[in-house]
Image (tube, rainbow, N blue to C red):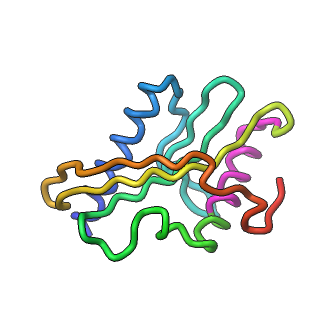
Amino acid sequence: MSRQISAGSFGEELTAQKLQQEGWNILERNWHSQNGELDIVAKRGNMLCFVEVKARTAGSLVCGAEAVTRAKMVKLVKTAMDYLYKNEINIHETYLRFDIAEVTLERCSDPRLLSFRYLEDAFSPSTVGLYL
């Protein structure tokens, strides 16, 4: 389990750094509600982005994006809704986006980056039958 946490933390830190380099303001990391967890919440201009980070080792059977199943998407959207409500964010004045960051590592025990792939607008609430 500690290896997965190490790989996950590495992936989240790398993703946050890359977002900041592109002008995003990281508002939250590992934000929790009763519905789940948001890995990264970032804002740039009037766009609010919820980023799911998936770190994998080389040779994993499923890539990061494939690991974000419909059920996971539903949890992410519901958790994002909790975030919007708790922070009193007007969804009519803010563009919302759900992204996925895929981080592939050589190994978990001593993470070394092999590849990074960022999927903008990877899914939307309507993709999973939810509407904000």
- Image spot of residue 56 (x, y percent): 31, 63
Q: Of residues 127 and 51, which is closer to you in this image? A: 127
Q: Of residues 114 and 28, which is closer to you in this image? A: 114
The N terminus appears in which quarter of the rendering? Answer: bottom left
Question: Position of 90 compared to 46: left or right?
Answer: right
- The mark tally for this picture is 0
The kind of secondary structure the magenta stretch mainly shows is helix
Question: Position of 38 compared to 80: left or right?
Answer: left
- For the point 53% across and 28% down, the residue is 24
- For the point 61% across and 41% down, the residue is 49
- Image spot of residue 69 (x, y percent): 56, 72
Question: Position of 54 compared to 69: left or right?
Answer: left
- Image spot of residue 26 (x, y percent): 51, 32
- For the point 62% across and 74% down, the residue is 71
Q: Is residue 101 above or below residue 127?
A: above
Q: Outermost residue toward the bottom? A: 61
- For the point 83% across and 58% down, the residue is 131
Q: Outermost residue toward the right? A: 92
- Image spot of residue 128 (x, y percent): 73, 68
Question: Position of 57 compared to 48: left or right?
Answer: left
Please provide the residue range marked out in magenta.
Answer: 76-90
Q: Is residue 42 above or below residue 121?
A: above
Q: Is residue 86 magenta?
A: yes
The image quadrant of residue 75 is: bottom right
Q: Of residues 12 and 103, which is closer to you in this image? A: 103
Q: Is residue 35 magenta?
A: no
